[in-house]
């Protein structure tokens, strides 16, 4: 009888923990899982380190200041999403949709953004050191003051991109398209510009530009 009573007490004590475990996959009313649908969600400052959100949709949501370092975000949709100051360092973001997203001052150090869609995205003062952006579409993206040192931008589309004051030291721009891009005061020291296209690019004050 005593052992049964002890078991009941133990179960009662565990109930709060079980309830917490059931809620652990939900942040701001959004289920944190692969393929989740969280449009217009508020996840400002959320701790999402290492989560798997591949194929998920966060269109028009607010994840500013959130920590998504090491997360898996392949083929996710973050178009028109607020991502100011968000940490994506080391995240896997291949084929992610970041069209018109606001990523000012975001951290994307060593992030994998191959084939990503970043058309009209705002990445001013973002840190993309060592990021992989091969074949990414950065058409008309705002990258003023961004850091792209040692980034892989092979065959990236930077048509009409705004790179004023950006740092691309040691970046790989092989085959990149920079037609009509603004590179005023940018630094391309040591960058690989083999077959890169600078047609009608603005290069006043640019270091290392052709």
Image (spheres, rainbow, N blue to C red):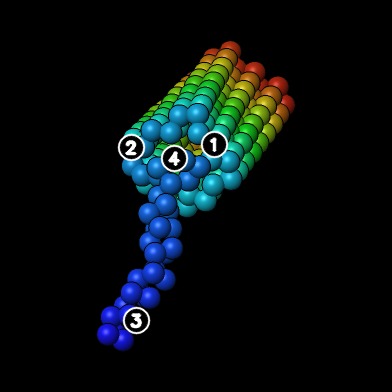
Question: Sequence order check: which comes first, mark 4 or mark 2?
Answer: 4
Q: Is residue 83 left or right of residue 125?
A: left
Q: Nearer the viewer, residue 151 or 77?
A: 77
| Mark 1 residue element | loop
Is tag 3's residue or tag 4's residue first in the polypeptide sequence? 3
Residue depicted at 38% across the width and 33% down the height = 37
Number of the front mark, 3 or 4: 3
Give the alpha-carbon distance from disc 4 to disc 1, as whole Å.
9 Å
Query: Which is in the foreground here, disc 3 or disc 1?
Result: 3
Quarter of the image holding residue 124? top right
For marks 3 and 2, the one nearer the N-term is: 3
Which mark, by number, is residue 35?
Answer: 2
Q: Quadrant of the N terminus?
A: bottom left
User: Given contact means CB atoms under 8 Å apart, are the residues at marks 1 and 2 in contact?
Assistant: no
Q: CA distance from mark 4 to mark 2?
A: 12 Å
Of mark 4 and mark 1, the one earlier in the sequence is: 4
Left or right relative to 184: residue 176: left
- Label 4: which residue? 30
First in sequence: mark 3 or mark 1? 3
Q: What label does residue 42 carry, if any?
A: 1
**Mark 1 vs mark 2: which is more N-terminal?**
2
Q: Residue at x 39, y 64 (%)?
A: 15
Disc 4 crowd rating (10 Å Cα; few below 14, some 14-19, many 20+) is some
Residue in the image at 43% along x and 58% along y? 20
Rounded to the nearest angstrom, the CA distance separating label 1 from label 2 is: 18 Å
- Compared across the picture, whether 197 is left or right of 181 comes to left
């Amino acid at each position: 009888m005593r052992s049964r009573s002890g078991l009941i007490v133990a179960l009662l004590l565990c109930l709060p923990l079980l309830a917490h475990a059931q809620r652990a996959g939900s942040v701001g009313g959004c289920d944190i899982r692969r393929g989740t649908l969280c449009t217009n969600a508020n996840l400002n400052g959320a701790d999402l380190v290492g989560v798997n959100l591949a194929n998920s949709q966060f269109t028009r949501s607010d994840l500013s200041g959130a920590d998504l370092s090491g997360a898996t975000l392949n083929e996710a949709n973050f178009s028109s999403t607020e991502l100011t100051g968000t940490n994506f360092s080391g995240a896997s973001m291949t084929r992610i949709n970041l069209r018109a997203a606001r990523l000012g001052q975001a951290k994307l150090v060593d992030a994998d953004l191959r084939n990503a869609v970043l058309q009209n995205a705002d990445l001013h003062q973002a840190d993309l050191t060592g990021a992989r952006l091969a074949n990414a579409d950065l058409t008309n993206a705002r990258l003023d003051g961004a850091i792209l040192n040692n980034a892989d931008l092979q065959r990236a589309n930077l048509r009409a991109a705004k790179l004023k004051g950006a740092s691309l030291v040691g970046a790989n721009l092989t085959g990149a398209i920079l037609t009509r891009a603004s590179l005023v005061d940018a630094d391309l020291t040591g960058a690989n510009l083999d077959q890169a296209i600078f047609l009608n690019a603005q290069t006043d004050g640019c270091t290392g530009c052709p």
